[in-house]
Amino acid sequence: MLGMFGLAGRRLAEGLIALFALLGFTLVPLGRKTALEHARDIFTTPAAADAFHELGDATLRLRQKLTGAIMGPERHAAPLDPGPAVPKVPDLPPARRPRP
């Protein structure tokens, strides 16, 4: 059936289905609450917060392992000596006066 409408018709039908799914998720009650309210209550528990923090820590460790495998072990460069606070301005040659 969607073949006769072409690609644009298919995208329109998929968009309408997604819209109805989103409306159902946010407006249709499942018991006393909607699915959105259930999800919000689940993700705001202390256990969920701990899980998100652990996931973040695991992601950082994985990133460090991957960058270590690709770039090699970290090499600490010698600290740079702080330069003077005022830049050195070169002396300019004296200005020439035009002849009258």
Image (spheres, rainbow, N blue to C red):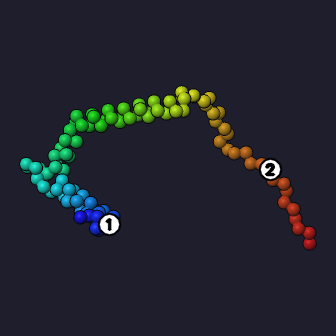
Mark closest to the chain's N terminus, 2 or 1: 1
Q: Mark 2: which amino acid?
A: Asp
Crowd tier of the residue under label 1, counting other residues whose Cα lies within 10 Å: few below 14, some 14–19, many 20 or above: few
Q: Mark 1: which amino acid?
A: Gly
Q: Secondary structure at mark 1?
A: helix
- Residue at (20% x, 59% y) in the render: 20
Q: CA distance from mark 2 to mark 1?
A: 74 Å
Quadrant for the N terminus in the image: bottom left
On the rendered structure, is 8 left or right of 100?
A: left
Quadrant for the C terminus in the image: bottom right
Q: Nearer the viewer, residue 49 or 17?
A: 17
On the rendered structure, is 83 left or right of 39?
A: right
Crowd tier of the residue under label 2, counting other residues whose Cα lies within 10 Å: few below 14, some 14–19, many 20 or above: few
Q: Nearer the viewer, residue 85 or 24?
A: 24
Residue picked out by circle 1: 6
Please tell me the numbered disc located at residue 91.
2
Vertically, is 45 above or below 21?
Answer: above
Q: Secondary structure at mark 2?
A: loop
How far across and down, in percent of the image, does residue 81 sit? 65, 33
Tag nearer the camera, 2 or 1: 1
How far across and down, in percent of the image, does residue 65 sit? 45, 30
Q: Is residue 17 in view from this perspective?
A: yes
